[in-house]
Amino acid sequence: MTSVAPSSYAKGHNLPALQIVLVGGRELGGIEASGKTCSGNTILGKDDSPVRKRTSISVKSEGRRFGRHVTVVDTPGWWWHFSLEDTPKHDQIEFVNGAALCSPGPHAFLLVIPVDMGFPEVYRFSLEEHLGRLKGNVWQYTIVLFSSNGPHQKDVFEKHLKQWPDLQWVIKKCQNRYHILDNKNKSDESQILELFNKIEKLVAMNGGQCYESGENALHLEQWRSIVKEAAEERIKAVETQRALLNEDIRDDQLGEERRIAIVGAQYAARSSSGNTILGREAFVEGSKRTVRCTMQKGKVAGRHVTVVDTPGWFYNSPSCATAAMDKLEMKLGVSLCAPGPHAVILTVPFATAFNKSYCQAVKEHMMLFGEDVWRYTIVLFTRGDWLGDTTPEERIESEGEDLKWLIEKCGNRYHTFNNKNRDDQTQVKELLKKIDEMVASNSGCCYEMDRDVAMENAEKKMLTEENAEKLLGNTTKIRAVLKKLYKGQKHSFSEQTLVLLGAREAGKSTAGNTILMGFAFRSGLTKAFKNRRGTTKCLPCQRRILKKNVTVVDTPGWSTSTDDASVLVEEEIARGVSMCLPGPHGFLLVIPANKPFTEEDKKATTKYMNIIGESAWRHTVLVFTCGDWLGNKSVEEYIESEGDNLKWLVEKCGNRYHLLNNFVDTTESQLSQVRKLLEKIDEMIVRNREKVFCPVAKQSSPFNWFRKKTFTEDEWLKREDDLVERMLRAVVEEPEKKPVEARDGSIVISIPNMNEETPSEFEMSVSRGPPIVAWWRSRFLNFAASSGYDTMSTAQSVRGADGMSELEYSMAEQSDQQKLLNVPNKSFIRNYIALGSPLKIMSRMNPLRRNSL
């Protein structure tokens, strides 16, 4: 450790030398680079190198500026949204040892952040973890350097800071030390002098001491030497293996056609690699996700090549966390190019750590195709630009045993693509050559899945698509019928109070932000940041959206397993409901559309919904998040592919569901999906008679109501609800009688019988006006008379759950007529008795709230 007498700083003497280390992350989209290298060149007064490569190893550069010796070390950047665990080991080591290149240590770390870059919470957590790898209190030696590619305005910058509270946290952590550097205006030396003055003040605050890394350059060089030596041995072994294979290749094994199936995790550049192979934009890429297996053909290097792109699984998630829809598409993709692919290309990005969780995810998803698939698999390393000045073999050796296992499992077959340099066709020709060598080792055979299994998968997909169309049709019909049924009543409410419910990592906070059109709740983090928890306390937020005062209450997520926090979650959810006075209009039950809905999820959902109260289901809308994950697939396909558990949940919520895409391109698109959700909530409020949620006591069986002394408001409401529910079930269960538009604008639908043994022969018209009993009666009797049906025989054929027919119910009721007259609306009861009982279910409506009619 070196030190300079504090008195020298007091007199304003300059440091004879400055030692600086540049650190910072990279963005996933747009301009990925943070500007570290460019900023280093600006500080040293050097021009940018014409060949722009990513900084893959820590690099030291020196020069003289303003009469002093300046050393700048550039270090590898990490993805801003990645945890330390997800950053490749090679980059971690080079980053940590970067400070060792400044002996005895740097005076300052410059944390480089583009001046106009957004800085969400996940970036802050990533920064904390990466700087945490450095020993000591590195923050007291850090200055935030905002890199700019042009002039900046102070008021614009201050406005940007206000938008990102986590960026404010970073500046505060550095004790408000920051500097803005315009890298395009290199001739402005005043900005460099100002930066040096800030560094000198920092050194003075640290008592003239520099940062001690605890490492030295010798250790770094030793590590690099070991990695290079192991990489050279691997190269020799692979070259020897390939030479032996080429000796055995026969011309009859090559053929003119090559069939390739590409598999891998999301963001592993599967589609981009397929485009590179075919030399054209054959598959979707970028922000769009592959959701259906797609086959494209082309001629490459004089060969007919067929490439199949498949959906990817979510990074390092195990197979059990992958939706059934995606797993089915993966299996279909490998069997799409009959009789089978010559090669299965497994894409693995160099920009991501291949740790134990990633390795386990690869193992489990590859097992979807069977153990024999490994004989036909080649590892394709993507993001070749991430290598910089290192080799693929150096990355393999530095990453650890998990990646070495994968390479050996694939018979030491691997290749590297730089999809940003698609004009380089030599990388494609070399891949085809390696595929030829593998085909020769497999005696010219291709990989074939069991035909019966392949046929079963194809039939399953076809059935899922058919059922999805049916579900969409039924949902559309139900909404149309309810709109007709409640026509004339208020359908747009000026206020909505909503409570978000769901499991952990379901996306509740993000859904709340989408609905409220802005940053209202701190959205949850990925599971990579295991030490960070999502929402732990209920938080309400109100905003005016689409001329409505919308209040959303975010609540903690529940776990599918039993844990100590479950009681606290129950209490906090109850507190969240109590925040909505007199009660919430609805619950938004959030389900992520990129994960399966398992039996455990069903049990946990049932448990927590029952704690709120059984009546909560009537006030619940399912909100599916991660709409971007589905791509061009419908949410109905996801529901049907997940099976009975999710279909049960949809039915439990009265077929009320909505899909949210939290990453829409425009404000108009976001408004559109929010408007549709609010419309569905309005419809639910109308059906709930504009009443907010309020827990109620359990009701007795509806058939016992006929034995009671009086009819209460709740009993009439329950009768009305039963009728509506039966009517809607008829719409769903009797699709052969599709709704048709009548001349008067009504919709003709089927009405179920009481015992539900056979389809009802009666139809009724849901026309204008509220569903009062007299209205239903007149409609039914008119239709029955015109159709020639005998009303008494119909009544006798319809029986309740306890075996009593409607005629028997009618006779039992007549003995209680005087008791029935105790009901406040006596005129309705007289009409009720006088009309007889051809179908008592038709009379189970609520007259008390419509006595004016």
Image (cartoon, rainbow, N blue to C red):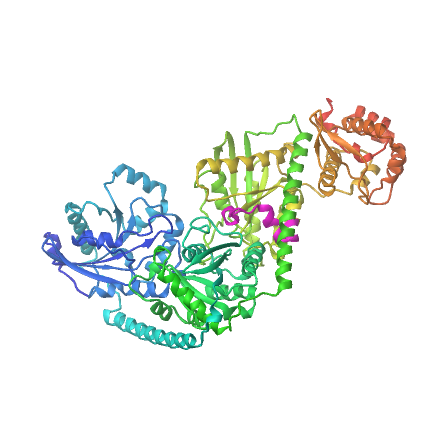
Residue 798 in magenta?
no
Height in image: 632 above or below 307?
Answer: above
Horizontal and vertical percent position of residue 192: 17, 49
Horizontal and vertical percent position of residue 748: 73, 32
- Say whether residue 384 is left or right of residue 722: left
Horizontal and vertical percent position of residue 588: 57, 43
Residue appearing at x 71%, y 32% in the figure: 740
Height in image: 658 above or below 378?
Answer: above
> Farthest residue toward the top?
852
Asked which quadrant contains residue 665, the reply is top left
Residue appearing at x 36%, y 65% in the figure: 89
- Say whether residue 61 is left or right of residue 645: left
Height in image: 831 above or below 344?
Answer: above
Q: Depth check: give the residue in front, 273 or 789.
A: 273
What is the magenta range? 625-647
Quadrant holding the N terminus: bottom left
Residue 643 in magenta?
yes
Residue 103 in sight here? yes
Horizontal and vertical percent position of residue 696: 68, 41
Residue 268 in sight here? no
